[in-house]
Image: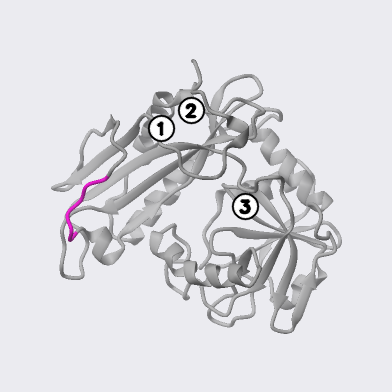
Amino acid sequence: MVKKNIDWGSLNFSYTKTDSRYVSQWREGVWDDGKMVEDANVTINESAGVLQYAQTCFEGLKAYTTEDGRVVTFRPELNAKRMYDTAQRLLMPPFDEGRFIEALDMLVKANLAYVPPYGSGATLYIRPYLFGSGPVIGVAPSPEYTFRMFCTPVGPYFKGGIKPLKLVVSEYDRAAPHGTGHIKAGLNYAMSLYAGYEAKSKGFAENLFLDAATRTNVEETGGANFIFITADNKVVTPKSPTILPSITRRSLMYVAKHYLNLETEERDIPLTEVSSFKEGGLCGTAAVISPIGSITTKDGVIAMPSGMDSMGPVTKQLYDTLTGIQMGRIEAPEGWIHEIA
């Protein structure tokens, strides 16, 4: 396979149009067979459900070139399952999990020329999404739906290396109890935009959102879960029904326990406890782990002992191990790596 003439090392985490994308339509109660198309534009009715009532969800995953030259994705069945669950919560017809994987294979194979080579620091980012495409005026589910999946080569989320982030405790709530914080709905991300803009305008990289019910426990940022390292090297992560079940976070917790022999725990994490942790990080598909340098609260600044220069040692071990698994340098647990080509 001849690769596209792209300067892989100069890529940012941004959109580049590729040759093909996958599309399937749901009409009269059934999904069609789906197909690959070249057109990157979406044409929908002016009264489409996605435009009127934000009936949409999405996923994000990556394809990698491994050390031995294979093209693989990482635990895509979990993305398929999470999207299925999200669609049900939004009263959209779920896209079958098996067909999700088939579409993924078709998409990546059709765009192999855009999969960055091993060692370039770049990956192929894949975006599946599902939305109400039929016209609706009354507050009701859309009569028709569209599932699409496209891909784009991207560089590292943080250009120039991963540096610890400055966070601020948000005055806004991300998700209400019994709401939609646990699903990957577009509306959740729209809700976080203003709070994120405000945080960045004050010099912070991201928000730390507290639980809306008591405003005492750490939940997540606008788009990533938290992990923390205690003084005795236990890896802890917030437990809450209103945060998104991050695939990266679940994988890191497994790596911590089974690869690094560290104790792990998922539980409530009061904000007042954070100052006792020695390391912390945000975890998600885009950057895997982004280390925390400091957290500004209404009572002062919590400075993480790991500092503002680099990842803490345990966080670095977690990062190196998980990325090693993804890139084929370290043997993966059974079923974690889905080979495409």
Disc 1 and disc 2: Cα gap in Å?
7 Å
Q: Earlier in the sequence, mark 1 or mark 2?
A: 1
Amino acid type at image mark 1: Thr
Residues at discs 2 and 3 in contact (Cβ within 8 Å): no
Figure label count: 3
Disc 3 and disc 1: Cα gap in Å?
29 Å
State whether residue 333 appears in this view: no
Q: Is residue 248 above or below residue 165?
A: above
Q: Is residue 223 left or right of residue 230?
A: left
Q: Residue at 57% across / 75% down in the picture?
A: 211
Residue tagged by mark 2? 114
Amino acid type at image mark 2: Tyr
Q: Earlier in the sequence, mark 2 or mark 3?
A: 2
Residues at discs 1 and 2 in contact (Cβ within 8 Å): yes
Q: Which residues are magenta?
A: 42-47
Query: Which mark is drawn over residue 193?
Result: none
Query: Which mark is drawn over residue 18?
Result: 1
